[in-house]
Image (cartoon, grey):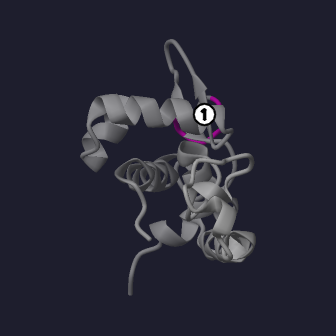
């Protein structure tokens, strides 16, 4: 299984935000809160195309992983500590529920093999295992220096 480029970019963007705007990052001397970045800065730092970074910021904000504010002094920052944000959170924020097959999704009936399929009832085992593996990796763990 391979993450989509969009989900991969979301992880890269969240990791960059964690380095600059998360726990352990500098505090704004005026507000005493973590610094904010904007999509342009995140795009430049990560190499993610600006329109994609803007779309990611929008989706990650809508999912509650980033908090954003407009205007002077606006920008985005993590909505909670990076140690509490997992890869599962990020992937689901931009891709929806984690599912290996379309038939795993609730209410999906678009498979020609559905009537005779013997594994469909068991696919949730695989989906849950993948989600659990992603839930065990935090954004904080991705931002640590490698020894």
Q: Say which quarter of the image contains residue 48.
A: top left
> Which residue occupies 29% across, 31% down?
50
Residue that label 1 marks: 61
Q: Say which quarter of the image contains residue 141.
A: bottom right
> Which residue occupies 39% across, 81% down?
146
Q: Which residues are magenta?
A: 31-37
**Is 9 or 130 nearer to us in this picture?**
130
**Is 102 or 80 nearer to us in this picture?**
102
For label 1, the SS is: helix
Whether residue 124 is visible here, answered yes or no, is yes
* Residue 77 is inside the magenta segment: no
107 to 76, vertically: above or below: below
Task: Report the side of 123 relative to 143 (left or right).
Answer: right
Q: Say which quarter of the image contains residue 91.
A: bottom right
Whether residue 38 is visible here, answered yes or no, is no
Q: Main secondary structure of the magenta part?
A: loop
């Amino acid at each position: 299984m391979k993450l989509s480029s969009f989900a991969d970019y979301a992880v890269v963007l969240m990791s960059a935000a964690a380095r600059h705007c998360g726990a352990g990052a500098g505090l704004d001397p005026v507000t005493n809160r973590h610094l904010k970045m904007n999509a342009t800065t995140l795009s430049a730092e990560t190499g993610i195309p600006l329109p994609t970074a803007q779309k990611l910021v929008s989706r990650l904000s809508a999912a509650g992983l980033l908090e954003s504010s407009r205007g002077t002094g606006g920008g985005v920052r993590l909505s909670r500590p990076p140690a509490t944000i997992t890869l599962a959170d990020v992937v689901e924020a931009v891709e929806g529920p984690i599912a290996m097959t379309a038939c795993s999704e609730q209410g999906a009936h678009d498979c020609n093999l559905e009537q005779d399929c013997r594994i469909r009832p068991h696919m949730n085992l695989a989906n849950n295992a993948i989600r659990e593996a992603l839930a065990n990796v935090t954004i904080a763990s991705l931002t640590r220096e490698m020894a």
